[in-house]
């Protein structure tokens, strides 16, 4: 794929993706600013979030074209989300209060596949109806990956990738990650093979920073970790996943990890990081490049 995009086989390409567009107004402000400064190449929007409507409105206003869908099927501990699908209650996905469950293992065990598909497609359709031409699909909190019980929902996601002609964030090198056990790696390889058989494009790798750590790592140490991580990415297409946000009372009310999000925002604006890309000959691309390639095949 890398050569079909016009690069050499040993080039190192990087997508810089800001997760959680729509989570808070401060998150939206940070991500829009990063786009305007060419400090990110992609974002993924959480449609069930309270400020996703504002995120979609500002993306139309600013002409932002590099937005994927962060498929969201579980709630965060301090931040409950509700389904977008509203034709009937999706009983297998929600609590008695009508919110997604916070327990991913519970979701994996109990979610009805038809309801999962209805909700995922509703999130995609909502974005399209609000002027977004999605660039890719990925997933919030790994809820469709089968990490806890082995019951995954990736094939349903691939059905939507085929329908909407979108790539998916399931890196080929996930099977090399030591944090996954043998059964998980075997499942991922099976799904990677399936995606390729369906002609759904996948990238090679994904990197990120330690998140929600206690005590909070100083900015200088976090910056050094990011520099080391980026310097060591391999040839192929890698995504750097960060969660940039401005600190607001709203953010502090829904996550205890607000300091990390603000530091990731600062890192993406850091001139030393931008110089590192040039020094290391890392070439920036977007998910839109990959989507357009997939749609041309």
Image (cartoon, rainbow, N blue to C red):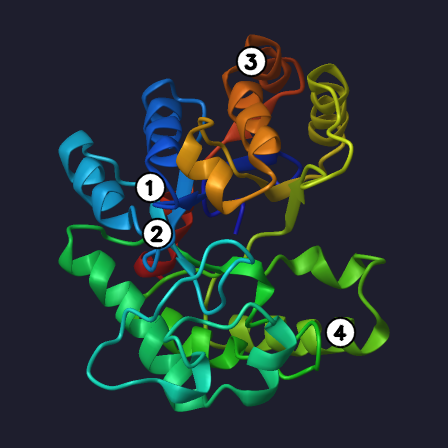
Q: CA distance from mark 2 to mark 3?
A: 26 Å
Image location of residue 193, percent across then percent down? 61, 75
Q: Quadrant of residue 97?
A: bottom left
Image location of residue 206, percent across then percent down? 64, 47
Does 260 sit left or right of 210 as displayed? left
Residue highlighted by disc 1: 66
Query: Along the polypeptide, which appears first: circle 3 or circle 1?
Result: 1
Q: CA distance from mark 3 to mark 4?
A: 36 Å
Q: CA distance from mark 4 to mark 2?
A: 27 Å
Number of residues whose C-alpha sits closer than 10 Å to that of mark 1, classed few (under 14), some (14–19) or many (20 or more): many
Q: Are marks 1 and 2 in contact (CB under 8 Å)?
A: yes
Query: Along the polypeptide, which appears first: circle 2 or circle 3?
Result: 2
- Name the secondary structure under disc 2: loop
Q: CA distance from mark 1 to mark 2?
A: 6 Å
Image location of residue 53, percent across then percent down? 22, 49
Query: Along the polypeptide, which appears first: circle 4 or circle 2?
Result: 2
- Name the secondary structure under disc 4: helix
Does 128 sit left or right of 229 as displayed? left
Q: Going 32% across and 57% down the picture, which residue do you hit?
A: 47
In the image, is residue 29 above or below residue 85?
above
Q: Nearer the viewer, mark 4 or mark 2?
A: 4
Q: Nearer the viewer, residue 84 or 16?
A: 84
Q: CA distance from mark 4 to mark 1?
A: 30 Å
Name the mark on residue 270: 3
Residue highlighted by disc 2: 135
Residue highlighted by disc 4: 184
In the image, is residue 14 above or below residue 170?
above
Query: Along the polypeptide, which appears first: circle 3 or circle 4?
Result: 4
Q: Quadrant of residue 191?
A: bottom right
Image location of residue 216, percent across then percent down? 73, 29
Query: Along the polypeptide, which appears first: circle 1 or circle 2?
Result: 1
């Amino acid at each position: 794929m890398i050569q079909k995009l016009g690069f050499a086989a040993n080039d190192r390409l990087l997508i810089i993706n800001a997760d959680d567009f729509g989570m808070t107004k401060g998150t939206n402000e940070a991500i829009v600013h990063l786009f305007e400064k060419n400090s990110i190449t992609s974002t993924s929007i959480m449609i069930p979030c309270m400020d996703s409507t504002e995120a979609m409105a500002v993306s139309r206003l600013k002409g932002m074209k590099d937005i994927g869908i962060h498929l969201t099927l579980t709630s965060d501990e301090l931040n409950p989300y509700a389904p977008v699908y509203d034709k009937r209650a999706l009983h297998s996905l929600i609590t008695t209060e009508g919110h997604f469950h916070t327990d991913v293992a519970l979701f994996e065990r109990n979610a009805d596949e038809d309801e999962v598909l209805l909700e995922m497609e509703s999130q995609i359709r909502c974005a399209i109806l609000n002027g977004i031409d999605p660039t890719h699909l990925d997933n919030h909190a790994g809820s469709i990956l089968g990490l806890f019980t082995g019951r995954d929902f990736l094939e349903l996601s691939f059905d939507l990738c085929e329908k909407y002609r979108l790539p998916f964030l399931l890196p080929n090198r996930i099977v090399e990650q030591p944090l996954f056990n043998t059964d998980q790696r075997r499942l991922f390889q099976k799904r990677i093979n399936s995606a390729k058989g369906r002609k759904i494009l996948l990238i090679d790798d994904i990197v990120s920073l330690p998140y929600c750590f206690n005590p909070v790592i100083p900015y200088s140490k976090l910056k050094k970790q990011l520099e080391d991580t980026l310097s060591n990415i391999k040839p192929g297409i890698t995504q750097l996943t960060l969660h940039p946000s401005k600190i607001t009372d709203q953010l502090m009310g829904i996550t205890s990890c607000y300091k990390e999000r603000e530091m990731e925002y600062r890192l993406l604006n850091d001139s030393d990081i931008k110089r590192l890309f040039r020094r290391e000959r890392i070439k920036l691309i977007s998910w839109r490049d990959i989507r357009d390639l997939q749609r041309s095949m």
